[in-house]
């Protein structure tokens, strides 16, 4: 059994990590450098004290929730879904999106509070990075949509590979800020998330359609450039 001092220390570290993750959220902090450093420090502490996202929240926080994040740009609808879908799967969440004439796109996450917040931090970081890359890429405006989709597609497969490693319990050790390898809980969370959705809406979620690119060269350029996006301080 842990002594009082060790339990108190663990609680203190958990509170610190929560604060760092909040500072690392782009919605709470518009200082990109500070947000990045906060995420790195949070990842370091989680690895040092063998914490997962599930350790950061109380039993109340572990209840399933549904969270909606609204996008405003119509062009983003075709590629941000790919990133949100991948990061949701990595972080034990269920993802779907909805569109209407008033709101271009709404991302919907189902999962525990901790996993939902982790997904939001990751997805927002990656979509903003892809947006910045497209803005500075040496391509014309009409090609940027294909570029973004290519980058998002490559990120999807990189994140899926990371999920496979975590599901098998593989620990990545080439970076001091890596998050600890997670146990193989994906099936448990997937079942619980599906049950939450079915209970709330009384139907099963239908699969969406995949976005396609009209400019193959721009798509390929984005796909290649996405290998340069650092994931180690965010999700590896």
Image: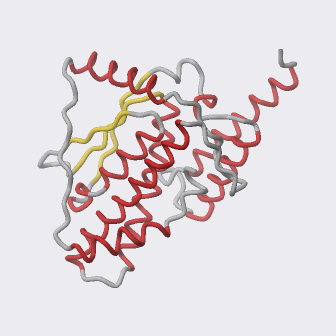
Task: Work out whether residue 25 or residue 169 is closer to the camera in this orientation and state it.
Answer: 169
Q: Quadrant of the N terminus?
A: top right
Comparing 145 with 113, the one in front is 145
> Which of the 4 image quarters holds residue 66?
top left
Which residue is painted at 38% across and 60% down in the image? Answer: 154
Q: Residue furthest left?
A: 101
In the image, 9 versus 216, the foreground residue is 216
Q: Position of residue 229 (x, y in %)?
A: 49, 65
The colour scheme of the drawn protein is secondary structure
Relative to 172, say whether 216 is above or below: below
Q: Where is residue 57 in the image (x, y as percent from the top left)?
A: 59, 27
Q: How many labels does the image show?
A: 0
> Residue 119 appears at what percent x and percent y?
46, 43
Image point 25% across, 82% down: which residue? 140
Is 212 on the left or on the right of 39, as rendered? left
Residue sitting at 25 percent across and 42 percent down? Answer: 97
What's the residue at 36%, 68% (across, down)? 223
Residue 110's image quarter?
top left
Q: In this view, does 100 lie to the left or right of 228?
A: left
Q: Quadrant of residue 21?
A: top right
Q: Where is residue 152 in the image (x, y as percent from the top left)?
A: 35, 59
Between 127 and 192, which is closer to the camera in this rendering? 192
């Amino acid at each position: 059994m842990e002594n009082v001092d060790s339990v108190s220390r663990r609680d203190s570290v958990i509170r610190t990590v929560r604060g760092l993750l909040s500072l690392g959220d782009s919605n709470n902090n518009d200082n990109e450098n500070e947000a990045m450093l906060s995420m790195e420090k949070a990842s370091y502490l989680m690895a040092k004290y063998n914490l997962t996202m599930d350790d950061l929240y109380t039993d109340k926080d572990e209840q399933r929730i549904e969270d909606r994040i609204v996008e405003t740009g119509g062009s983003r609808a075709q590629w941000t879904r790919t990133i949100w879908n991948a990061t949701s799967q990595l972080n034990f969440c269920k993802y779907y999106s909805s569109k209407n004439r008033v709101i271009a796109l709404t991302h919907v996450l189902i999962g525990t509070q901790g996993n939902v917040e982790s997904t939001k931090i990751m997805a927002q970081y990656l979509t903003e990075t892809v947006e910045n890359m497209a803005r500075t890429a040496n391509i014309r405006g009409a090609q940027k949509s294909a570029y973004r989709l290519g980058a998002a597609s490559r990120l999807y497969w990189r994140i899926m590979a990371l999920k496979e490693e975590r599901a098998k319990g593989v620990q990545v050790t080439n970076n001091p800020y890596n998050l600890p390898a997670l146990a193989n809980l994906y099936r448990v969370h997937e079942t619980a998330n599906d049950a939450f959705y079915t209970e709330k809406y009384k139907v099963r979620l239908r699969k969406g359609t995949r976005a396609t690119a009209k400019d193959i060269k721009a798509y390929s350029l984005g796909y290649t450039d996405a290998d340069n996006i650092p994931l180690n301080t965010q999700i590896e």
